[in-house]
Amino acid sequence: MTDNVITLKSPAQIANLRSANRIVAEVLATLREAAAPGMSTMDLENVAMDVCRKYKVRPAFLGLYGFPRSLCISINEEIVHGIPSTKRILKEGDLVSVDYGVVYEGMYGDAAISFGIGRMDPETERLMKVTEESLYRGIEQAREGNRLPAISRAVQQHVEDAGFSVIRDFVGHGVGVAPHEPPQIPNYVGRATPNTRLRVGMTMALEPMVSTGHWAIVVLDDGWTAVTKDGSLAAHFEHSIVITNDGPEILSVLG
């Protein structure tokens, strides 16, 4: 994170954020369309980089804090920060989460989706559905005058009502001139949840991560890949948004 100052974005910055996030949305849609049994996760890294070259933008995650690739790709019990590899091969029934970012005119776009490879188990489909729904429940609360815990509470309630668990070690965040800006945005309400008042011009990346089992995690020996401690499945959805006078606007959609 940057320092604790929350910056409200100018119309020009928001326009560039909208462009950055539309490119991210295209990357994610392209990855979902391309993914198939027998592909390696490195194949999908290359697909994502091709879209970056098409738009002449810099992938935001490549080298960020030392991350070795541009794409975070996580499978089944992996929650986030999985590293693409020629050795990791997709197979029928896998649950795949992809997280991507780009830099456009100095502004960071950031979004994530989960999807299945081929035919999926009904409970896995339900996990993805509930996780995505919880994201939209949180976005709905991102309005002028609300407090940040309203977002966290909406996500947590929807997830737990469905019998799933919110991953607590990772949070949403402000986004804009840096990939991670204040405030941190937990997906559950706890003692450390900031009570920040939401204002027009705030730009944030909301990203619930949800498991079918317990919320506890373990980071693998690669130092990056976070997995559920109990081996349960996990899903991840993320949108970058801006708070406007008319409510939240989702930036990470195809325009």
Image: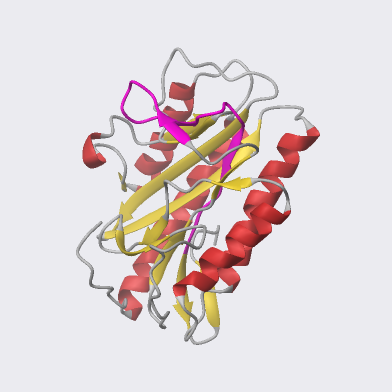
Q: Nearer the viewer, residue 16 or 151?
A: 151
- What residue do we see at 38% from left, 79% from top? 201
**Left or right: 90 in relation to 199:** right
Query: 113 left or right of 45?
Result: right
Magenta stretch holds residue 218? yes
Report the colour scheme.
secondary structure
Kindly give the residue lying farthest to the left in the view shown: 3
Q: Is residue 39 magenta?
A: no
* Stretch in magenta: 217-240
Q: Position of residue 76 (x, y in %)?
A: 59, 28
Residue 29 visible in the picture: no
- Residue at 23% across, 40% down: 65
Q: Residue 28: x, y in percent?
A: 52, 44
| Whether residue 108 is situated above or below residue 234 in the rendered picture | below
Quarter where residue 45 is shown: top left
Q: Quadrant of residue 51?
A: top left
Vertical relation: 199 (above or below) 80? below
